[in-house]
Image: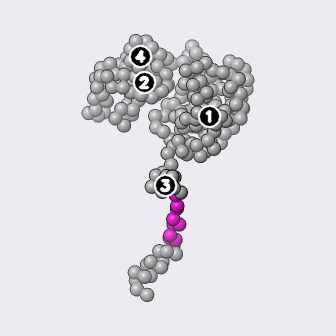
Amino acid sequence: MFVTDFFFFFSTINNPPVPKRYVRAGQQSTINNPMSVLQMLQDRSNNTCELCGSKENLSQYTIPPSLNENVANDVLVCKTCLDQIEGTVEMDTNHWRCLNDSMWNENVAVQIMAWRLLQRMRAEGWPKDLVDMMYLDDEALALARATGEHEDEANKIIHRDVNGVILEHGDSVVLIKDLKVKGSSMVVKQGTAVRNIRLDHENAEYIEGRVDGQNIVIITKYVKKS
């Protein structure tokens, strides 16, 4: 046996060939196309809303203040849940009775969303009882508190744009002047749109956003809500 033959024999024993994967007609191969975050969420949740269990109008939601899509930071939610989370419609406390089950979800992202929503409704009484039953480790609890849902209205930090309009997580803003990014040569031009902003939960003058693939901190008096 030649050296090359021996090497091949040794390699195949320790590294057996990977079986071929076949794709049916009409299906997309995932061999060279790793699952997207949305696909992983759909798989994780069995294509159901991770908060209420609905199977209709599902979409991916990145938990603030995270700016990056990541299966550890995202949840799959239905439109009914999403609209109430983002505040485009009023909270329906009866709808959120579903949190009695989803608060026990094994995925931390779902637990965090359940905690925040229960805190938002704690004046109703029953949500506070559920919060008291929950357990989040220190890291998860710190993230859950990042948006201030647990704060009384009088103590909440309110972010406002140059015109005094309240800014919320996920809003889009436009810069009203050129801004130099500290620590780099980058200049963000007036009129630049920044979408899906995140609020600094410790300072009402700061928001975060992504411009040209880079996360930057922006002072609120230099933006206008769009």
- Give the residue number, with chain letter if any, for mark 1: 56
Q: Nearer the viewer, residue 109 or 138?
A: 109
- Give the residue number, with chain letter if any, for mark 2: 172
Q: Position of residue 32 (x, y in %)?
A: 45, 55
- Amino acid on which the number 2 mark rests in the picture: Ser
- Amino acid on which the number 3 mark rests in the picture: Ser
- Give the residue number, with chain letter if any, for mark 3: 29
Q: Which residues are magenta?
A: 14-23
- How many marks the image carries: the answer is 4
Q: Secondary structure at mark 4?
A: loop
Give the mark nearest the N terminus, 1 or 3.
3
Q: Nearer the viewer, mark 1 or mark 2?
A: 1
Quadrant hosting residue 188: top left
Pointers 1 and 3 in contact (C-beta within 8 Å) = no
Q: Nearer the viewer, residue 145 or 186?
A: 186
Give the mark nearest the N terminus, 4 or 2.
4
Give the mark nearest the N terminus, 3 or 4.
3
Q: Residue at x 46, y 52 (%)?
A: 33
Give the mark nearest the N terminus, 1 or 2.
1
The N terminus is located in which quarter? bottom left
C-alpha span from label 4 to label 1: 35 Å
Q: Secondary structure at mark 2?
A: loop
Q: Is residue 123 visible?
A: yes
Q: Position of residue 80 (x, y in %)?
A: 61, 27
Q: Is residue 109 above or below residue 153?
A: below
Q: Residue at x 49, y 31 (%)?
A: 65
Quadrant hosting residue 136: top right
Identify the disc placed on residue 161: 4
Pointers 2 and 3 in contact (C-beta within 8 Å) = no
